[in-house]
Image (tube, rainbow, N blue to C red):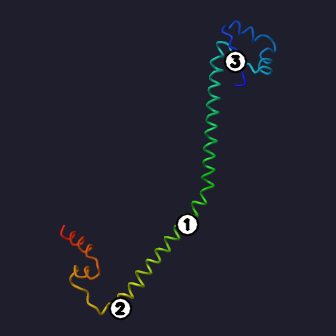
Amino acid sequence: TNFGIMFVPFEGLYAEVVSRPGLIETLGRDYHVNVAGPSTMAAILNSLQMSYQTFRLQKRTDDVLRVLSAVKAELPRYQAALRRAQQQIETAGKTVEGIITTRTNVMERKLKDIDALEDAREADEILGLESAGLLADQKDED
């Protein structure tokens, strides 16, 4: 610290120091020394404790403000990245929708005159989906 506390242990001595004109002001101004007696020491220590707590709180407040400032600076970039991701998702959705509607409709129109196989296992075998057919059959049996 840049100050000192001169503790005078008896009220009579403390009263003598305080009664001398200009002594307390000179000690405080020139030497950064505060005079404390038995009745004032607790108040001075309490004041010091509160000032240290205030300083610590101010430092944490500064840290919180720095974090909030960084978050505020990052927020536009975060929003832009989310917008890009949303556009990509919408584009993928439109592509899938196009495949479902256009391509599937074209294939169904071309295949409308052909009868589907009745036996699902035979269809799986022809298409090379034997393992998928076995899994589907096992689920049906359960």
Eyeballing the image, is 55 above or below 39?
below
Is tag 1's residue or tag 3's residue first in the polypeptide sequence? 3
Q: Return the residue found at the far left.
A: 141
Eyeballing the image, is 129 above or below 2?
below
How far across and down, in percent of the image, does residue 31 sit? 78, 19
Residue at 43%, 77% in the rendered image: 96
**Which one is in front, 127 or 35?**
127
Q: Is residue 107 left or right of residue 24?
A: left
What residue is pinned by disc 3? 5
What residue is pinned by disc 1? 83
Amino acid type of the residue tagged 2 in the rendering: Lys
Residue at 70%, 15% in the rendered image: 6
Residue at 62%, 34% in the rendered image: 56
Query: Looking at the rendering, in which quadrant would you find the N terminus?
Result: top right
Quarter of the image where one finds residue 65: top right
Amino acid type of the residue tagged 3 in the rendering: Ile
How far across and down, in percent of the image, does residue 28 sit? 77, 20
What residue is pinned by disc 2? 110
Give how far apart the Cα atoms at labels 2 and 1 are. 40 Å
Is tag 2's residue or tag 1's residue first in the polypeptide sequence? 1
Amino acid type of the residue tagged 1 in the rendering: Arg
Q: Residues within 10 Å of mark 3 (few under 14, many from 20)?
A: some
Give how far apart the Cα atoms at labels 1 and 3 are. 62 Å
